[in-house]
């Protein structure tokens, strides 16, 4: 079974919804990421799905990881397509196919280790102190670690990180 076949299988249910897209572009018009980075375009992602360019153009598409899952597109789509959910499904498939950008893996590792997506630098802490801002709350990363452990996320992230190191 090729990667495209696997994607087709996974997308069977979603296709009944995706095919309703008539490419009006409302999703892109309201997308906060598209406003900053026109390389990320939910309408184009839907077009690729409609055209059947799966693995090579979508799963391998690093742009999907820019989606913040804000669901503005889903709320505004005149066809009622939950585009935010479609993109999440694409991300899930990308994870299954070990195709996750190093930056996302690094963020996940940081969450596991510190509870934050990125360590807060000392210079930022100094600046906050100078400005008289209150101390930042500490993340309970033991609780976060436990959750990621029991859901199997930690193991999966470590696998993905090892794969990247082996390349
Ligand atoms: S808003 Fe809906 S119908 Fe319009 S392009 Fe986006 S997904 Fe397609
Ligand atoms: S869910 Fe993703 S694609 Fe949709 S509007 Fe938000 S950032 Fe854009």
Image: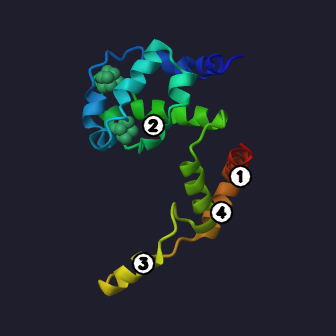
Q: Residue at x 47, y 78 (%)?
A: 122
Q: Secondary structure at mark 4?
A: helix
Q: Quadrant of the N terminus?
A: top right
Q: Quadrant of the C terminus?
A: top right
Residue 17 visible in the picture: no
- Which mark is drawn over residue 145? 4
Residue 13 visible in the picture: yes
Q: How far separated are the C-alphas under marks 1 and 4?
A: 13 Å
Residue 72's spot in the image, x, y percent? Answer: 31, 38
Q: How far separated are the C-alphas under marks 2 and 4?
A: 28 Å
Residue 97's spot in the image, x, y percent? Answer: 66, 33
Q: Secondary structure at mark 2?
A: helix
The numbered mark, 3 or 4, whose residue comes first in the sequence reads: 3
The numbered mark, 2 or 1, whose residue comes first in the sequence reads: 2
**Residue position marked by numbered label 2 in the rendering:** 63
Report the side of 149 relative to 69 (left or right): right
């Amino acid at each position: 079974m090729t990667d495209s076949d696997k994607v087709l299988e996974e997308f069977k249910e979603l296709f009944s919804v995706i095919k309703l897209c008539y490419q009006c572009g409302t999703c892109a018009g309201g997308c906060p990421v598209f406003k900053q980075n026109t390389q990320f375009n939910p309408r184009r992602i839907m077009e690729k799905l409609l055209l059947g360019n799966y693995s090579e153009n979508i799963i391998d598409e690093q742009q999907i990881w820019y989606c913040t899952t804000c669901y503005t597109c889903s709320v505004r789509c005149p066809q009622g397509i939950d585009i935010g959910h479609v993109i999440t499904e694409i991300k899930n498939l990308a994870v299954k196919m070990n195709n996750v950008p190093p930056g996302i893996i690094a963020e996940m590792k940081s969450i596991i280790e510190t509870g934050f997506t990125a360590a807060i630098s000392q210079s930022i802490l100094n600046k906050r102190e100078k400005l008289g801002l209150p101390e930042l709350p500490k993340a309970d990363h033991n609780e976060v670690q436990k959750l990621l452990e029991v859901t199997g996320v930690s193991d999966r992230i470590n696998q993905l990180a090892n794969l990247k190191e082996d390349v």
